[in-house]
Image (spheres, grey):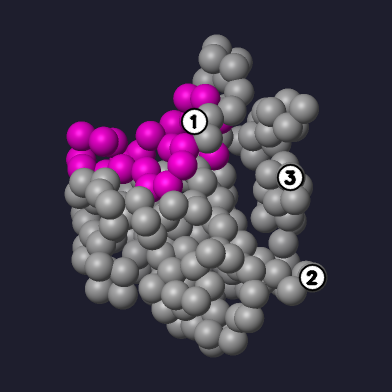
Amino acid sequence: MKLSELFSRCLNASYTHLDGGIDVAHTKENGILYIYFEDSDGIGDWRINLDFPAEFYPVVGVYAHRGFLRSWKIAEEYLAGIISSARGEIVCTGYSHGGALALLCHGYIYQKRPELRAFLHSYGFGCPRVLWGKKNEKTEKIWGNFTVIRNINDAVTHLPPKSFGYFHAGTLLEIGKSGTYSAIEAHKSENIIAELEKYEK
């Protein structure tokens, strides 16, 4: 599936609304479990985004952005049974705030379902930095199949700042042409899709 199509599916999924303003969707097609996380859509989500002190996540053994981690723990309760019963490929996808949750979901699946590691692929469109500390062999191994899609100077993908100790895990795929958008405009879904379609040509 092309990234533009996957992103479009993420934008248009039928989401289940959980406590704390967390929005999750999942579908199964051709034996593949797709898990989607919606972007920020309210003041509550932005409060989570700005709650950036690091907190330890024992399931994966890493330090992560506290607000995103607390949101993921709510989603984790909802998805635990779905993930435990998965029997094939899993694709986790999220946009913006949802990209951060997709990253944590990927780490959870990697640890809880080791037999599916080779079949786990995840994508964070306009994803902020989530992990805190130093990128190392462990984080590279866990998130080796996670891709952050950044539309040039997308402001959200540069937060929290590196100077605060945060980093992107996995592969950083940069799309778009410098000078096309402002840092805010670059994060808009329609502009990400437009640049993905150009990239795919």
158 to the left or right of 121: left
Query: Upstream in the sequence, badge 2 or badge 1?
Result: 2
Query: Upstream in the sequence, badge 2 or badge 3?
Result: 3
* Viewer-side label of 1, 3: 3
Assess whether residue 170 is covered by the magenta stretch.
Answer: yes
Which amino acid type is marked by label 3? Answer: Lys
174 to the left or right of 29: left
Span of residues in magenta: 149-172
| Residue at mark 2 to residue at mark 3: CA–CA distance | 16 Å
Front residue of 64 and 51 = 64
Residue 6 picture location, percent across and down:
70, 51
Q: Residue at x 78, y 70 (%)?
A: 29
Which amino acid type is marked by label 1? Answer: Asp
Front residue of 126 and 196 = 196
Residue 86 picture quarter: bottom right
Q: Which residue is mark 3?
A: 2
| Residue at mark 1 to residue at mark 3: CA–CA distance | 21 Å
Q: Which residue is mark 2?
A: 30
User: Number of labelled discs?
Assistant: 3
| Residue at mark 2 to residue at mark 1: CA–CA distance | 34 Å
Mark 1 crowd level (few <14, some 14–19, many ≥20, 10 Å Cα): many
